[in-house]
Image: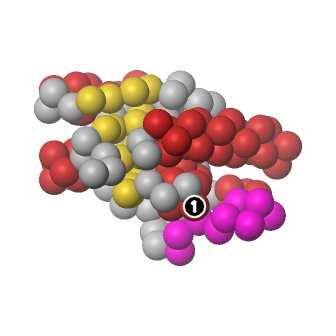
C-alpha cells in the first residue's frame, strides 16, 4: 500500500503546490497545504509548472489541518522560511514520520530561480515516488 504524503510549506502557494503536482505525475497519493495560506498560487510558479507540462492544481492554497497530518504517513516540510509558522513542530508533536527538504521559497524570486527550485522539487519527488513503489 502506498504511503499518503502531505507536502507542507508556509503559504501553499509555491513549493508544496509544485511538489503535489509532481507527486501526482509520479503516482504518489498526496496533497499539499500551508500553515498561513496565501490568497492564490504564485503566478511565476504557475508559469514554470505549465512550461514543464505539469500544471499545478487550480484550487486556492489551503490551510494544513490536524486531520491532514493525522491521515498522512509522511509529512514533507518544504522548508521553513517563516519560523513562527513553520509546520515542522506541528508534525513533530503528532509523532509523524517527517522530512524537511529545506528548499528556498520561490516567493519574490526571479523566474530562473523558480525554475531551479522547481527542478530540485521534481528530483526529490521522483526519488520519493520510486522509493514508495
Res. 110 in view:
no
Q: Nearer the viewer, residue 5 or 108?
A: 5
Q: How is the image coloured?
A: secondary structure
Residue at position x 53%, y 74% in the image:
58
Which stretch is magenta? Answer: 49-58
| Left or right, residue 72 beside residue 109 | left
Residue at position x 80%, y 64% in the image:
51
At which x and y percent is residue 66? 16, 48
Residue at position x 25%, y 46% in the image:
72
Dot 1, crowdedness within 10 Å: few (<14), some or many (≥20)? some
> Which structural element holds mark 1?
helix
At which x and y percent is residue 15? 56, 45
Residue at position x 40%, y 37% in the image:
76
Q: Quadrant of residue 47?
A: bottom right
Q: Residue furthest bottom?
A: 58
At which x and y percent is residue 6? 35, 47
At which x and y percent is residue 99? 39, 27
Q: Nearer the viewer, residue 129 or 16?
A: 129
Q: Quadrant of residue 92?
A: top left
Res. 94 in view:
yes
| 80 relative to 17, above or below | above
54 inside magenta stretch: yes
Q: Quadrant of residue 49?
A: bottom right
| 48 relative to 58, above or below | above
Q: Nearer the viewer, residue 121 or 93?
A: 121
Residue tagged by mark 1?
A: 25
| Left or right, residue 29 beside residue 51 | left
Amino acid at each position: 500500500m502506498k504511503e499518503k504524503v502531505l507536502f507542507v510549506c508556509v503559504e501553499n502557494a509555491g513549493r508544496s503546490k509544485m511538489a503535489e503536482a509532481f507527486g501526482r505525475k509520479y503516482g504518489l497519493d498526496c496533497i499539499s497545504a500551508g500553515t498561513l495560506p496565501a490568497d492564490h498560487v504564485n503566478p511565476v510558479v504557475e508559469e514554470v509548472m505549465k512550461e514543464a507540462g505539469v500544471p499545478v492544481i487550480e484550487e486556492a492554497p489551503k490551510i494544513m489541518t490536524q486531520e491532514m497530518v493525522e491521515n498522512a504517513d509522511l509529512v514533507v516540510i518544504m522548508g521553513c522560511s517563516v519560523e513562527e509558522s513553520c509546520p515542522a513542530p506541528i508534525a513533530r508533536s503528532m509523532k509523524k514520520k517527517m522530512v524537511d527538504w529545506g528548499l528556498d521559497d520561490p516567493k519574490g524570486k526571479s523566474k530562473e530561480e523558480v525554475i531551479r527550485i522547481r527542478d530540485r522539487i521534481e528530483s526529490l519527488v521522483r526519488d520519493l515516488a520510486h522509493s514508495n513503489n
